Image (spheres, coloured by chain):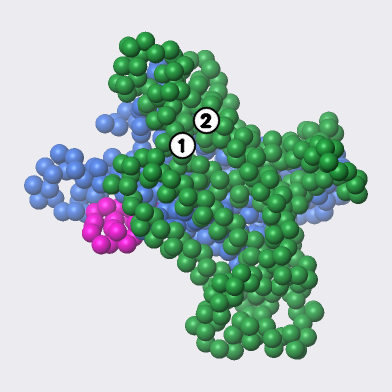
């Protein structure tokens, strides 16, 4: 059913644009030490220096190179996005999958709990927890992942429940396939499209939430993050520094999130072809 | 979901958030009073006050008794004292609340209205020029976090063009009354409101559009066309009515994200609502205040979601029997 999956993604304009935007952030982030002679925490110049040959985007209020902090900030964002995406998706798959396969009372209890988590506003809880815990990268990944998985658990459960009823699954079962074998060999491969869409959406939400938390100043203050860069820059709107400090940071953050949103939307469209524009079907 | 199931879900969520509020301060290292009240409080703490607070939180008793004391205080609407403001938390919150309600309420109504209208128009012309351009534009807008959009508007209209004020909700000490006061308030509201409208339209638009696209393929649409209904009537009277059902569920989440978004947008424009209050409390590490605001906002979100869910079973009876 989805064997032409990669081709579909390649032919999807939004998907291509999304991947392009993500690479535009990912590649410089990986190559950060090559693209900048400074370290992000280094006080390398005078304060509020305007852009010049040695400081491409000038320096901030304590003399750190803004371009360098942007590069390393991308690393933080992507690391958190990736970490949360994997952890949250795995949790959702285990919880949703086990609920669908076991059924009965276990399913009832677990899904009631998932529903309760779903109606709680994740960002508010994240702010509350961070205010007390002042999380660094690893704690932040765990915190955000534990807040955003429930929605995907519902999606996975529904999808697995409907796949379970397919004819070829019953056929495999009559041939003596075990539940685990069915899950790994028959159900998981078919979850591929929706799984990748969920991973991308999780990454987007995580990056968004991390930036928000850092913007409010509740994450670890030593974390090099776009959110906290924006928070600092906002204090100096009366100076000209916003042009090379605030604007690039805000646009880069939005670009990353837009890239992930486009890719996620494309993947969702592919897994549900009814949403495709008429010409592309 | 039946009504009992829904109520049970919200009850669980309510218990979860309260338990979290109780556990989190306990997870901090050091003096529990400091965790509950922050460093600032210790400066003004007299031995007498300390004894009183220990008594109040039952800190010298078992964990279970502390838990009971915590619930008892909450049941009386007692959110604690804020040392930074030297007033009960509930009182400070109530003062900031009207500004947040004004911002959130107007943002919600306007963005829902535009989102739904654009979604209907776009979804019923799938693949057309209007649909393609709207979809692209709004997908791009979708990527902007509220505070980044706020900053961009602030820089463009506040700093660069200087046609809107940079901060606050009214011009301080202007002593304006009546009509000119209303104009002043609207003038200050314009940028934060604009931010919300731009950021919040895409979510509603995308869902309405997708739902509309699916409805337009149903056979009752063909029937409506066959019996000679005008395109406008098919769109709004037949297809939109059914397309808006899933959109109704989004209204709850949309409301939640506008309320949380207010925390960030108010900070950008120093708008004197709950968000700005929270930011200042975070700076002061004023824990009773932080907890009070977040608990209050979470409850707002829960109540709205509960109402939407209950309404939904009424609009779509299929759900109640599922």
Image quarter for residue B294?
Answer: bottom right
Which residue is label 1 attached to?
B247
Residue visible at 68% across and 77% down?
B34
Mark 1 and mark 2 on one chain: yes
Total marks placed? 2
Q: Are marks 1 and 2 in contact (CB under 8 Å)?
A: yes
Which residue is label 2 attached to?
B116
x then y, percent, for residue B208: 47, 31
> Which chain does blue denote in the image?
A
Residue B232 colored in magenta in the image:
no
Quick one: label 1 or label 2, which is nearer the N terminus? 2
Compute the Cα span from label 1 to label 2: 8 Å
The foreground one among A206 and B238 is B238
Say few, some or many: other residues with alpha carbon within 10 Å of mark 2 (under 14 / 14 to 19 / 20 or more).
many
Residue A106 colored in magenta in the image:
yes
Compared to residue A45, the image places residue A15 above or below, namely above
Compared to residue A8, the image places residue B99 above or below, namely below
**Residue A46 in the figure: left or right of residue A6:** right
Q: Would residue B101 be seen by someone viewing this image from the given angle? A: yes
x then y, percent, for residue B89: 70, 67
Q: Tell me the shade of chain B.
A: green
Residue visible at 63% across and 43% down?
B105
x then y, percent, for residue A185: 23, 46
Magenta segment, which residues?
Answer: A91-111
């Amino acid at each position: 059913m989805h064997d032409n999956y990669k081709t579909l993604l390649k032919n999807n304009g939004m998907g291509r644009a999304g991947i392009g935007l993500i690479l535009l952030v990912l590649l410089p982030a990986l190559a950060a030490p090559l693209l900048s002679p400074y370290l992000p925490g280094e006080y390398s110049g005078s304060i509020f220096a305007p852009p010049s040959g040695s400081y491409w985007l000038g320096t901030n209020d304590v003399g750190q190179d803004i371009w360098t902090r942007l590069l390393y900030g991308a690393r933080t964002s992507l690391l958190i996005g990736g970490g949360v995406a994997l952890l949250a998706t795995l949790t959702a798959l285990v919880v949703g999958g086990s609920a669908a396969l076991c059924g009965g009372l276990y399913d009832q209890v677990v899904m009631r709990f998932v529903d309760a988590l779903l109606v709680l506003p994740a960002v508010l809880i994240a702010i509350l927890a961070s205010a007390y815990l002042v999380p660094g990268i690893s704690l932040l990944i765990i915190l955000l992942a534990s807040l955003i998985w429930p929605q995907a658990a519902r999606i996975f459960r529904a999808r697995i429940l409907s796949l379970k009823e397919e004819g070829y699954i019953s056929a495999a079962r009559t041939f003596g396939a075990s539940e685990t074998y069915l899950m790994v060999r028959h159900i998981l491969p078919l979850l591929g499209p929706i799984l990748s869409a969920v991973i991308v959406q999780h990454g987007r939400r995580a990056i968004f939430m991390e930036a928000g938390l850092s913007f409010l100043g509740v994450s670890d203050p030593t974390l090099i993050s776009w959110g906290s860069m924006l928070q600092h820059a906002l204090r100096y709107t009366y100076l000209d520094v916003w042009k090379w400090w605030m604007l690039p940071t805000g646009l880069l953050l939005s670009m990353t999130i837009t890239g992930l949103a486009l890719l996620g939307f494309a993947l969702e469209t592919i897994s549900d072809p009814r949403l495709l524009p008429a010409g592309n079907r | 979901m039946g009504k009992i199931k829904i109520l049970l879900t919200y009850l669980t969520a309510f218990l979860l958030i309260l338990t979290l509020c109780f556990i989190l301060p306990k997870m901090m290292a050091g003096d529990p009073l400091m965790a509950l009240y922050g460093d600032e409080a210790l400066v003004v703490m007299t031995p007498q006050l300390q004894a009183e607070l220990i008594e109040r939180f039952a800190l010298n008793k078992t964990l279970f008794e502390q838990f009971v004391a915590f619930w008892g205080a909450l049941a009386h609407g007692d959110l604690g004292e804020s040392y930074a403001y030297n007033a009960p938390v509930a009182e400070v919150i109530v003062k900031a609340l009207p500004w947040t309600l004004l911002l959130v309420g107007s943002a919600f109504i306007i963005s829902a209205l535009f989102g739904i209208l654009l979604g209907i128009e776009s979804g019923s012309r799938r693949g057309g020029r209007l649909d393609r351009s709207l979809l692209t534009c709004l997908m791009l807008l979708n990527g902007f976090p509220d505070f980044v959009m706020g900053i961009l508007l602030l820089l463009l209209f506040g700093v660069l063009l200087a046609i809107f004020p940079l901060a606050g909700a009214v011009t301080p000490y202007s002593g304006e009354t009546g009509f000119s006061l209303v104009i002043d308030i609207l003038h200050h509201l314009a940028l934060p409101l604009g931010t919300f409208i731009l950021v919040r339209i895409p979510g509603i638009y995308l869902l309405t559009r997708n739902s509309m696209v699916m409805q337009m393929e149903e056979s009752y649409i063909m029937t409506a066309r066959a019996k000679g209904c005008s395109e406008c009537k098919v769109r709004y009277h037949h297809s939109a009515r059914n397309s808006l059902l899933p959109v109704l569920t989004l209204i709850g989440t949309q409301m939640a994200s506008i309320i949380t978004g207010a925390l960030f947008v108010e900070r950008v424009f120093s708008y004197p609502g709950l968000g700005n209050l929270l930011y200042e409390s975070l700076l002061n590490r004023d824990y009773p205040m932080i907890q009070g605001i977040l608990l209050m906002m979470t409850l707002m979100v829960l109540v709205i979601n509960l109402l939407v869910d209950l309404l939904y079973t009424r609009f779509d009876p299929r759900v109640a029997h599922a």
